[in-house]
Structures are given as C-alpha cells and as structure tokens.
Image (cartoon, rainbow, N blue to C red):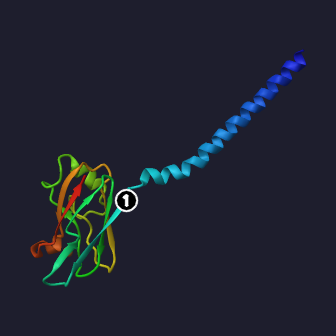
Amino acid sequence: MRVALLTTVVALGALACGKKGDQTQNQMQAAPPAAPAAASTGPVVEVKMTGNGSTKAGYEPASLTIAPGTTVRFINVSGGPHNITFWQDSVPAGAAAALNAGMKNTVDNLSGAFLTQPNETYDVSFANAPKGTYKGYCTPHLTLGMKIAIKVE
Ligand SMILES: [Cu+2]
C-alpha cells in the first residue's frame, strides 16, 4: 500500500512537472510577439515634403485626418532641408508630452530633426496623443507658408 501510494505521488509529480514545463514553454513562445506588439504604433500615414529650394515649399497633403495611434511619416521629397515643428499652443490640452514622446531626435520642444537626404523620413507617433487638431510648420520654410494641420479623431 505504501509503495502504491509512493508511485501515485511520483506519477502526479511527473505530471505536474510536465504541465509546468509546457506553461513555461508557452510563455517563452508568447513573449517575442508580445514585445513588438507593445512597441507597435498603429497605422502609418505618409506626408511628402516638397519644394523647389527657393520660392515654393509645402506638405502634401497639407491637412489630413488620422486615427488615434497613427504614425505620420514625413518624407523629404524635394527642396529640403525640411522638418516638422508643432506650435505648442496649437496642440490639444495635455498633448505636448505624448507628442514629444512620439518624436525622436528633436532639435527643440515639439520640433523634429531636419531632413537633408533625398527620401529621408521622420516619424511622428501619435500614440497616446489626445484627439484634436495639431498645427505645425517646417522651420526653414515657415515664411514660404509650409504648414500642416493634422486632425486626430
Ligand atoms: Cu521645408
């Protein structure tokens, strides 16, 4: 009777270990896909930055509506250098922190890096950015009227 009991305990122990091992393996398999998902920035919308280098410069499109969590990818097509700077008083209340977090290599508050190379891109992630209208401009070409309005809704 004692032997039978021991056998049962050992068998249960082996079963338990097997289960635990499976769970660990499942967690390890699930971990890699979870990491990119957390870093995901949602849909990507492209905006071209164009110009003739002297008298004309603009964003195409100059106004757009995006879903929350969208990344806006600015592309230096012609007439650079270009960048994207948001007017701090134009963004919705509480949006500046989220927007700054979504802009890499800024040169100033809410002011993105300058693009000098052909087809160079700059991403602005609107992850966690509240709904509303964000107005921005290109620092080198503000006098040429290079402005953009991005509506999150
Ligand atoms: Cu520009």
At label 1, which amino acid type do we have? Pro
Instruction: Provide residue 20's location: percent of width, then percent of height.
Output: 68, 35
Please tell me in which quarter of the rendered image ligand 1 is found: bottom left
Residue 139 at x, y percent in the picture: 17, 70
Which quadrant holds the N terminus? top right
* Above or below 47: residue 37: above
Q: Secondary structure at mark 1?
A: loop
Q: Is residue 33 above or below residue 74?
A: above
Depth check: give the residue in front, 153 or 100. 153
Image coords of residue 66 (percent x, y): 28, 58
The residue wearing badge 1 is: 43
**Above or below, 136 relative to 116:** above
Image quadrant in which you'd find residue 110: bottom left
Q: Residue at x 64, y 41 (%)?
A: 24
In percent of the image, x 42 and y 53: which residue is there? 39
**Closer-to-camera residue (13/49):** 49
Disc 1: CA contacts within 10 A as few (<14), some (14-19) or many (>=20): few
Residue at the image point whose x is 30% and y is 52% from the top: 68
Which of the 4 image quarters holds residue 75? bottom left
x, y (%) of residue 91? 17, 53
Going 76% across and 28% down the picture, which residue do you hit?
13
114 or 73: which is nearer to us?
73
Residue 138 lies left or right of residue 7; in this view the side is left
In the image, the residue with mark 1 has its CB under 8 Å from the nearest atom of ligand 1: no
